[in-house]
Amino acid sequence: MIADKARLKSKRRIERFTGYRLPDQAFHGTVIEAITSRINFSSLDGTHRDQILAFIQEFCRCNCRDSPFCGCPERAFAKLIVELRENGLDHKDISRHLVDTYGIEIYPADVLGFLEESVHVLEAVRDIARLEGKEETAVAAAEHIALISR
């Protein structure tokens, strides 16, 4: 999954504030738990504070019983990447946006690979929906394919 390739730019700084080592993946449950409950935000500079707060607001706002280990943050991240592409950003722009807004580092090639994989999945959804007579789903999948592929 694409979320496994995402890294937090300020990971070392967060480790200093929490007092323990964190995994590299930005969406690892331990990292999410650390940034949502163990950071004194007043000790961070403005940019890092804003990025971490944006990260929490965008990806960590579910009410699941197993949060942050529920998978919702990872799904929200994947959805955001698809939405950014559908709004016209290319893979390089998406990568820059994620660093600037959320402090998430991800290679543009990883974003491109994820988008290509998403198109293949959507093509399968479209084809199966047509076979099952669910034309509305097939049309919606085709629209997403067109927006991502442009």
Image (cartoon, grey):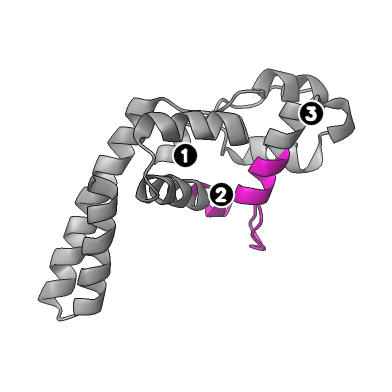
Q: Indicate the amino acid at tag 1.
A: Ala
Give the mark nearest the N terminus, 1 or 3: 1
Residue depicted at 67% across the width and 23% down the height: 10
Give the mark nearest the N terminus, 1 or 2: 1
Q: Indicate the amino acid at tag 3.
A: Gly
Q: In this picture, which residue range is highlighted in magenta?
A: 53-74
Quick check: 101 above or below 56? above
Residue depicted at 53% across the width and 34% down the height: 98
Is 56 included in the stretch rendered in magenta?
A: yes
Q: Indicate the amino acid at tag 2.
A: Pro
- Quickly name the residue at label 1: 3
Give the mark nearest the N terminus, 2 or 3: 3
- Quick one: SS at disc 2? helix
Q: Position of residue 22 (x, y in %)?
A: 66, 26
- Quickly name the residue at label 3: 46
Q: Are marks 1 and 2 in contact (CB under 8 Å)?
A: yes
What is the number of the mark on residue 73?
2
Q: CA distance from mark 1 to mark 3?
A: 25 Å
